[in-house]
Amino acid sequence: MKDNTVGKPANGRAVMAKRLLAEKMRHIKTSKGFTGFGGGRWGKMPQPPQWYSSSTQLCGIYPFSAGTSRPNTGTPLGRDMNVDTAVCGDMKTWYDAGLISSSSMMLFGLNGNGKSSVAQRFIYSMAARGIVPMVFDPLKDEYGEMVEALGGRVLRVGPRGRDKINLLHLGALGEAAAKIGGTTGEDMRRQAVSQAVDMVALVVQINRGSPLSDSEDAVLALMVRSVISRVRRPSMHDLVDAFLAPPPEVLSAVACNDAAQFLGEYRALHLSVLALLSGEMGALIGGSEAMSIPVGNPGGFCFDTSSIPASNTKLLSAAMLATWNIGFSAIDAHWELSRHDPSVHWGGYLAVQDEFWYPMRACEGIIDRADRIGRTNRGLGVSELKITHSPKDFLSLPNAKDRETAKGFAQRCGVLGLMALSLDDLHALSAVQPLNGKEIATVAGFNTPPDWKPNMNADGTPAPPPGAGKILLKIPGRVGLPVQMTLTAIEKAKHITDERSNRVAFAHEMETV
């Protein structure tokens, strides 16, 4: 007889195990809930809302907070275009943190995409931390109102402006040298005289349109130094007169027997110096008036040369280079005074040079002198922001030596700021500071519209271009950070580029009439 009693319990256990397994399979835990009927699984998981705040405020809701992997100290810039987290930083904070080798940025971008807005964001934020703005604003008067709002001083430079330039005046550096005295004061005075020599040579070259010969360069330096040492308030008229009656030390240095022989050999140089005193150039630099800026204004300074038409290349280039000399000399003077006088506070400077490459194209061979004029040798606490349109601005210089020197500006800067640029621009820049393919594609696509629909503001006015406020921050050796910036209400009120440029153009027309 067959006994089935043993198999029955076994079959019952197997059936029960299968049922339990099936039940478990129906209620598997997933990221959207448990599976199976009654498990509560969601078909679509909603995204929780996100808030951005400081760790001081968010610490109470731990662990539901996460830090950003992006830099988060310094100037608030915007949001990372890839991961939407906040990005903060500037040349000074990144340099202090050891992330970059120099506290400097070179900012490239096509017109209308917000280069000056980026510059103003740095100015506002760094001024709030006690860093004084020194703004060189050549074309549109974009920064004057904000510098005045910060309590700073705007210097209106031009032939018909209120502030004139005396190339032979030793400026704030010479005044500080007299106050400090001693060996340091003598060194500062020599530096100020050397800068005056460079400035006169630069302006002569720009007005002439060609470089000085070696002998002309040497003679002009001798003449400038002699006039500064002999005349109490020297001007360019004194320098012209000195060619007609050269001092004995100059005649001896160039092995000339008398004034007639000297004038015969250096007649071309004399005529070039004399030419500076004619026309609008003479109105700007020919007087004995000396534009000098006081040391220590916490609101900063802005040199506005917008009254000079951009078409007047020689005059505008001369004015730009001269204001660089005046401004950077004031920074050097402030630094030295702070070291010798405890009552003089030093908080550092942010030097903003807009249209940086403009004067470099005025004449072949001036870039080395311009570099000396615009480089402060008291680098402690001085940050620099150089602004231009395209890397082609320096790669297209006619002289090969000038091009190599110009590349050094981009190679030495701590950060590259890349706004909307063409592919040709980006490939040219990549030969100086390497960019990978994704970085090039990202920047080239900043100005690509999302569709063909008209992009208008709520009030019916045209909206900014697609690339407005988009910037790739590139530190050598690190992947670039694409950031979308937005303007605050105060920034919008103080910065309307098109309106100001139209106002300046209208003023030019009225002056012409």
Image (spheres, rainbow, N blue to C red):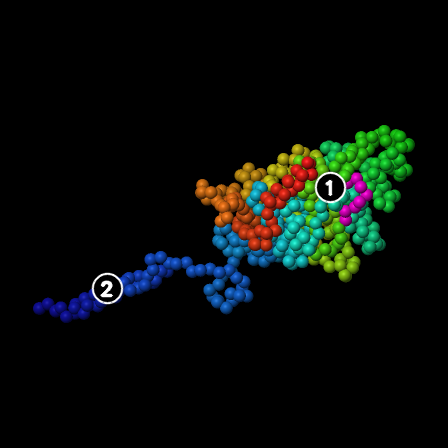
Identify the magenta region.
Answer: 284-292
Q: Which mark is residue 267?
A: none
Q: Residue at x 72, y 48 (%)?
A: 155
Q: Depth check: 383 or 158 in front?
A: 158
Could you classify mark 1 by the number of other residues whose Cα lies within 10 Å: few (under 14), some (14-19), or many (20 or more)? some
Looking at this view, is 197 or 461 the one in front? 461
From where the camera sits, is residue 321 visible? no
**Can residue 278 be spotted in the picture?**
yes
Q: Please indicate whether residue 32 sits to the left or right of residue 224 in the image.
A: left
When asked about the image quadrant of residue 10, the answer is bottom left
Write down the residue under mark 2.
18
**Magenta part, dominant SS:** loop
Residue 314: quadrant of the picture? top right
On the picture, is 32 further left or further right than 217? left
Instruction: List x then y, in percent, for residue 267.
Output: 83, 30
Given the current orientation, which residue lies at the most extreme top position? 264
The location of residue 151, given as percent across then percent down, is 68, 55
Q: Which residue does the image show at 51% across and 67% down from the upper left? A: 59
Circle 1 SS class = loop
CA gap, disc 1 to disc 2?
A: 98 Å
Q: Which residue is mark 1?
A: 160
Farthest residue, direction left: 1
The residue sitting at 73% across, 51% down in the picture is 331
Q: Residue at horizontal 72%, vertical 39%?
A: 318
Q: Nearer the viewer, residue 370 or 324?
A: 324
Q: Amino acid at mark 2?
A: Lys
- Give the image location of residue 73, x and y in percent: 58, 58
What amino acid is labelled 1 in the image?
A: Arg
Considering depth in this image, is 77 or 262 the residue closer to the camera? 77
* For discs 1 and 2, the disc positioned in front in the rendered view: 1
Quadrant where the N terminus is found in the figure: bottom left
